[in-house]
Amino acid sequence: MCKLNTEGYKLTAPALYPLGGDVPPPYSWSMLPAIGPPPGLHCTRPQCLSLRVVGQQGGCSMLFLRAEPVRASWLKSRPPDAPQRAPLPGLAPGGCPGFPDPAEVTSDRLLFIRVFRTALSLDSPLRPVHLQRPDQELMTRHHSSQITEPLKHLHHVKVVVPLMNFLSHLGLEKFYPNKLTRQSLSEINKNSLNETSVTSLEEIPWCFLRNLFKINADCRSFTQLPVNPEETTDEFDFDLYTADGSDNKVNPLDLIVALFLCADSFLQQEMALKMSMCQFSVPLLLPQANDNQCSLMLWALRDIVKEWRPHELFESRGFVEENIVQANLPLYSFVRLKNCSLSKSELLNLVLSRGQQNHNIFMHRNLEGGALKREIANGLVEVCWYLPCGRENLDTFQVPVAFANLRGDICESLPQFHFLLQVSTATFVFLDKVEEEEQKVLASLQDVKSKLVLVVNRKEGNAREDMMSVKTTVEKLGLPKSNVKTTDSRVNGAEFSKKLCAAIKTSLAAVTATISTANMLGKAVELGLSVDEYKSDDQKKAAEEIVRGIGVRSVPDYKKQQLPLQGENWKRLSQLEKKECRLTKSSDSGLEEQISQLQEEKQRIQQEQRQYNLSRGMNNFIDNLSTADKVNRDFLLKWMKLKLDSHSRKKLSNLRNEFKEECKKKDVKLVAKLGQALLDSSLGIEHYMREMGLIYEVSCHSKMNAHKMCHLPGLAAEMLLDGYPLELLDGDASNIPQRWVTDVLMELHQKVGQKSQLLVLTVLGVQSTGKSTLLNTMFGVQFPVSSGRCTRGAYMLFLQVGEDLKSEFNCDFILLIDTEGLKSPHLAQLEDSYEHDNQLATFVIGLSDVTIINTAMENFTEMKDVLQIAAHAFLRMKLIGKKPTCHFVHQNVAGVSAHSKGMTERKHLLDQLNEMTQIAAEMEKQPSIKAFTEVLDYDIEKNNWNIPGLWHGTPPMAPVNTGYSEAVAEFKKHLLETMKSEREVSDIPQFLEWMRSLWKAVKYENFIFSFRNTLVAHAYDNLCKEFHEWEWEFRKEILSWQKEAELEILNADNESEVETWSGVVESKKSEGTKKITAQQTQMKEKLRDYYKRKDRHVNLIEKYKADFVNSITSIANEIQCSVSTKLDCSLELKISSKKAQDIQRKYRGVIEDRVMKLLSDCKDLHTLSLSDEQLTHDFEKMWDRATAGISGQKERDIAGDVLKQLRKNFSNQNVSEELQHIDLKETSRSPFKTRSEHIDSGIETFLWRGDLQSFADTLIQSCTQFVFDKLMTGGDYHDSFTKDLLEKVDQYLQQSYKQHKTNTQFEVDLKLHICGIASREFLKMHRRFLSDINPKTQLDEYKTRYLSDFLDLYKDKDQSQKKANDFARFCIKPAVEDYIRRSLGVDIVDEILTSSHSVEYSSRSFFQYNIQNELLLQENFESFVKYISNYEMYVKDWIFQHTLQQMSEDETLCKLKTKNLEVVAKKILKALNDASKGKDGCLLPDTRENITKLINNMRKDLIKDISISVEAEKSTLFQIQTTFHPFVNSLKMSIEDLKVELQQEFSKSEDITETLNKLPVKPQDELFRRVFGCGQQCPFCKVPCEAGGQNHKKHHAAVHRPKGLGRVKRENNSKLVETLCTTDVHSDHEFKNVHTKSQWHPYKDYTTYYPDWLIPPDRTIEASDYWKYVLVTYNDRFAKEYKAKPADVPGDWRKITKEAALKGLKEAFNIK
Ligand SMILES: Nc1nc2c(ncn2[C@@H]2O[C@H](COP(=O)(O)OP(=O)(O)OP(=O)(O)O)[C@@H](O)[C@H]2O)c(=O)[nH]1
Ligand SMILES: [Mg+2]
Ligand SMILES: [Zn+2]
Ligand SMILES: [Zn+2]
């Protein structure tokens, strides 16, 4: 036998229990899942016993086991080289010092000792162990001699078998002691969702707790497993344990004791609180694991607050509210002797619930599970309180009374008994008879005998003997007769309880001294009981110290001194911010000046706040909070709460009382006063926390303190994670400490590894309708609850979602928001209160995914008011694209009976809602919305919940109604179920973004117009980007198709008639239409798919969907038009080039005849060969004569044609007379001047003069540019040019009608002017074209070739190489160049869009950002003027310059050209190869004719790609002598040469500008189209619209400018106007212009005149810094430029730096 050495180990904790096989029957391996049977050991009964010590140094436990031979042999059979592996899983190899290594011990009486880690965390405080003999019973009952041996060595360890046994039975042992926390229960997981009945013992505690947390007063009956007779018991697990048939049953009392033993201090409190709400008795003395030990549960009961109305307050309707442990109450104790057959608990219940429905306050033997043998609950003392409601007929006792009940026999729990005797007013001892032992106990009570009452149950049988024993005792003690109550079977419980009541009442009348539970502490210590509260003494002291700081001061004074930041200044700041959003006309100064002043005051206050030094109270609070660990922090906060509450309870409860009364009386003024007093006098943790937030907020501005305070958000985030609520909206000041909330939540976001998807749930409703109670019941949380005003502002609380549900819910947290009650209608008259409520509701509804509207049906007017507010808020959400779910909870409606009746009521509710919606819709200027269901998905069946009243009976003695708890549970289940459906969830950063923008929007009165949110902006931007890409795909597809179609038309058979060509054009057009339609459908599909995406916040941009759909249609129409025009142009080009060709052919024929004649002449006349000079001379002479008479085409009357188009343009207006005698050649010689005839009369000149002129100038400039662009492309004039030009003018004019109210005269004059310019330019174009195609010039080009042909022919030279070369040079090369020209445009766009510069063009707003950024960096005033006055030109130039730059970088253009060259060369060579072969695939015969055939075949093959000029071919191949084969071979070589030559040409530096200008598809135009948008400008400041798509309903821009920049000046002094339209629209100011017919009109209602503009206020003050800076910088120069006086700019604008301006720009465009 090896020696057991325990010296090295301090066995400190009390739990050691045996487990294993045969000996102690109840234990089995499976009870210790962490260990299990040894591996390889299949024996179900390992002959061993193991003992485990829980609580060992270093987190180790010890396992003792004795192995029988079986195990020894297993050990021996271990392979010798096997590592020193632990024989049991979890055993550390090698053993521990002082313990024998198992390998060394090989006897058959083997003893293993191993130290290993268990899954338990052993962080509970360890107490020194009593040196005690081991539990004898255990040894004798369970053990063979072998085991006694080791246990002897462990004789100083206390073995607590029954407790651990019981706990492990319930699966609770790992929580012992005090390891079960509240948090583990508040998590939302599968268990908390599925309310299936329990199936195993392990589930019982959880089921009980969950139901208790739902305040289900039935929870005690969930402690039994359903009976299942069929169940065959697992012999291993149950065979031995089923002996007494109670293996799967639990006595609820045992369960409660077990849970209290396992719960940590906070859970204990919570359990006690909920139990007392259920009107259960709660533990006062809890038996501890080691026998005869018990502790006073003072801490656990600390949280219970009770209200009652003593009879003296009946008249005044007042009530007493008190922390029950601090109330001095008479206490009556009930104990029993072992033999008592009467149920004292049952009797007590009768006493306590007289006048009420019978309620089982105490558990008793006739309740489910109550009769089971108690394992651990003996020695428990429970307490409950009788509280009067103030009504004589209901109240059993007129004063509050406490009752204590000791479980089990007195003799087993003497300490408890003695304690009770000491603290009770009277102790009732229940007994049948008195046994010898008991005699002694009772006899020793001489000194307290007056407090002793014997309750004797006289039993039949040996009644005499029993009564004698009682008599002896009574006599020994000398008890008066009145102190003995007897009953027998003839008296029933009710009657006897009456008797008892009477006795107590008598006793009450004589009570002199009472003791509060808190004061029992001294007695407990005296008697050697432990007290649970001692754990947190330090925190208690710290809390007391803080609270002591209040001293004799009144709470309002204290707050002013110690919590100053949340005082006046903070409220003032909030007011200032609101003022900023609602500027009034009243002040003398300008608007921007007003803002500046407000800003200044804000800064002053902030400055003042920065001076602030940490007050003592706060310093103390923060210090204590920051240094404590989690548990101590919890204690500190709890202590503070308790202390603060009790400090102000009396005052507050009186105030609340009064408040409630006055509310009923409807004296508004008094109510307001009381409300304020309530606010001022309340002081809780939340005030300290609020101050902490404000300290942080302030410290951010002052560098000095910042580092000291930077840990605060982390601290608060931890607290949030621990389940504390955090103030989101300060209800007192109506303000949000944004930086604080942001930083705290961001800390939290980081702490959880950025996994912070949220689901937000809010409750809203009238004051004191049980909103907080509802949330608490639903989620087991602890929002403050009280009768009378309670919650202020809005608080948030984070609930963890369990791992098992995260994916299902698609979120990590449920965020609960509890809100301040809305005021009832008569209170709403209070100043600002309606507004306050409205703001609150909009704000929280805006934040939440699910909103619970809590109503109490009794009061319909109140409800209407809430509905009004809610409907309004929901409507606003709809308008900004957020769609929350909403549930209506009707409190105090009994569920079942109400359902059918409820239907009509629900209908009525819906009617109400519809009505409210209509009103709200009108207020928000959305009259089209008529029904609530248009705003929300609302189902009257599914979204309405009836919840019965909270109390079952009359408070205070009423328990919570089980109906309430069940209805709430049902509601919760459904709610969570619906949350599972697919939603877009946001994480914390997104939540914060919503919070900021919502709050901002709420502050402006006009919610819809003021709502701006970067999430929305991002979502919109993303869609725009995609949309642009789709659009370009669309255009590209059509452009490349069009390129081919054009060539096909050009390549159409020259011999056929014009009609045939028209046919080709028509068929191409219809082909094009089909293609466009297909593309359009495809694009629409893409859009539809996009809106199905889950990752793009598409719900926020739902309202723009129609815009984009319309845009697709208009893009398609536009493309359709342009294709049609282009094809028409091609046809005309075909016709005119045919004409030119015909002429050319005619002369070519003549020339060729002459050449041939000259050739034969020369050959015939001169026998001698002529010299080259001679021949050339002759040729020249012949040529001159032959070409003498050639004349080209006639010039068209371009001016006439343009005029014709102009007349057509005016065809539906009666202006023909004016156009009758016009000669365009003569118009527009002088600059265009606007005149008063251009404007309808009655409008003041100053309103339009300069403005209109600049408009006209811009238009003329842009049209001229358009004409030049056409000119530069080359080719002939086409009527479509004029048509396009006029269309462009029309577009502009539409705007001028709108903006300037111009008339037809203006239009006529302007168009004439522009057409004049155009006609002259187009004439130039036409002339250039004519000269280009002049046959003489063309022929002259061929001259040298004819000459050389002539010479060759004369000399009979072989020409194959030369002809092929010429063919390549003169026919193929131009075609190739043309091909490249046609393709290049699209390629360049593609190149730019995929390059690093692509972002610039990705969306309109980003483009704007870029361009403005660049402007400021360049600091060029002229650029600013051009940008502002002629935005289109500026943008075009910008794009062109950028394109140029990009094309020259890295020889990009050359690369693109080469790429195209490769493509086309490949095509040509392939066509050549194909064409040179016959159908059989063999080379065509080597004849001369086949050359023509070859070329014709190639032409056909390449009909879509290139156009080989016929005339060029004919003249090149003139009199070709060579045959097919050599020609083909030479041609191939020539084409290769051509490629090389072209490549060289490309790489030589060249004029990129010209290349770009000549492209038929101009990249700059395509890019321009992308970023330019609709071209509309803000009616006030002229900033261009940035909305995506072509056809949007609303124009908008990210930043607006001071109006002066858009040429607006003041009427009286011509000063430029400095205000921003974004400021004006939320002010009281007015405007007048041509639209208002010179009448003043409020800016707020600008939509009356400009319904298609959306001008929200700036998201931040900084957003418009850019333009403010520009105005300040160039004020004088702008004034000069605009012929006005400089603007008066507010002083602080001058402080804006260039950097700030650039930063503001970034902010405005959401650039990170
Ligand atoms: N009779 C009755 N009382 C209730 C019911 N629900 C809650 N209460 C009690 O009403 C009081 C107010 O409950 P709270 O949950 O604080 O109400 P609240 O709506 O959050 O109040 P405020 O936050 O002040 O607006 C508490 O004393 C509750 O116990 C109910 O259905 N019937
Ligand atoms: Mg509340
Ligand atoms: Zn504007
Ligand atoms: Zn627009």
Image (tube, helix red, strand yellow):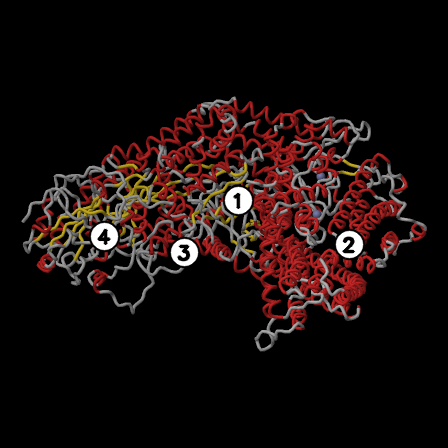
Res. 165 mark: 4
Question: 135 left or right of 1286?
Answer: left
Secondary-structure class at tag 1 = helix
Task: Say what amino acid the circle numbered 4 marks.
Answer: Asn
Question: Image quarter for residue 1277?
Answer: bottom right
**Disc 1 to disc 4, how far (Cα)?**
49 Å
In-front residue for pair 281/127: 127
Question: 210 left or right of 1103?
Answer: left
Location of residue 489 in the rendering, given as x and y in whole percent from the top left corner: 30, 56
Secondary-structure class at tag 3 = helix
Q: Which residue is mark 3?
A: 190
Res. 1332 mark: 2
Question: Image quarter for residue 291?
Answer: top left
Task: Say what amino acid the circle numbered 2 marks.
Answer: Asp
Res. 991 mark: 1
Dot 3 or dot 1: first in sequence order is 3
**In front of the other: label 2 or label 3?**
2
Dot 3 or dot 4: first in sequence order is 4
Quarter of the render that holds ligand 3: top right
**Disc 1 to disc 2, how far (Cα)?**
68 Å
